[in-house]
Image (tube, rainbow, N blue to C red):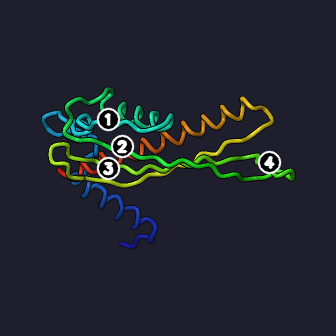
Amino acid sequence: MWFPDAVFARYAALAACLLLAGCFRPMYGSIEDGSSPVIEELSRVNVAPIAGRVGQMVRNELIYAFSAGEATDAPYKLVVTLKEGTEETMLQRTGEAVTKIYELRANFTLIDVQSGKVLHGGSSASRASYDRTTQLFANQRAARDAEDRAARVVAENVKTRIAAYFASRG
């Protein structure tokens, strides 16, 4: 029996998916007893204070994402440092920026509190653009909104990378 290449490729992909379906489990999924090891480990992470308004935003997002509350007597500590900057783009003839890009870079380290050993680390970055107008308050609000968007993206990325670390451990 002859199959065109496209049909054969679809059947081969379907067969591969069916064969491999039992090999994977969702990162946040539960095991047979109903517990979720990754979610339990995330709830045991204490997020150290981060300097600045944007730092507080990132910290709050991480605390909420990890456990919906601050972990006390946690065996893990997450230390995050931030670096912020803006870049002007789309200049008018007068040299004034019409659009700015806010950039947020975070370096993070997951530490075992008992031994002081660094378990995992990495970095994350986010960029958020905003338009500038002749109104001062609108410019300040747009800049703050860009900072908030970037903070949420960085926090989500850090959370996912920490969760992936816990999932890979076992």
Q: Mark 4 and mark 2 in contact? Answer it, CB < 8 Å.
A: no
Disc 4 vs disc 1: which is toward the camera? 4
Label 1: few (<14), some or many (≥20) within 10 Å?
A: many
**Tag 2: residue type?**
Lys
Foreground pick, 168 / 33: 168
- Label 1 sits on a secondary structure element that is helix
Q: Quadrant of residue 78?
A: top left
Foreground pick, 114 / 69: 114
The CA distance from mark 1 to mark 2 is 7 Å
N-term mark: 3 or 1 = 1
Vertically, is 150 above or below 169? above
Disc 4 vs disc 2: which is toward the camera? 4
In the displayed structure image, the side of residue 42 where residue 55 appears, left or right: right
Residue at the spot of label 2:
159
- Label 3 sits on a secondary structure element that is strand
Residue at the spot of label 3:
109
**Residue at 44% in and 71% down:** 5
Residue at the spot of label 1:
66
- Label 2 sits on a secondary structure element that is helix
The CA distance from mark 2 to mark 3 is 12 Å
Residue at the spot of label 4:
96
N-term mark: 4 or 1 = 1
- Label 4 sits on a secondary structure element that is loop
N-term mark: 4 or 3 = 4
Disc 3 vs disc 1: which is toward the camera? 3
Q: Mark 1 and mark 2 in contact? Answer it, CB < 8 Å.
A: yes
Could you say which disc has been placed on residue 144 in the image? none
**Residue at 30% in and 60% down:** 15
Q: Quadrant of residue 35?
A: top left
Foreground pick, 116 / 3: 116
**Tag 1: residue type?**
Phe
The CA distance from mark 4 to mark 2 is 37 Å
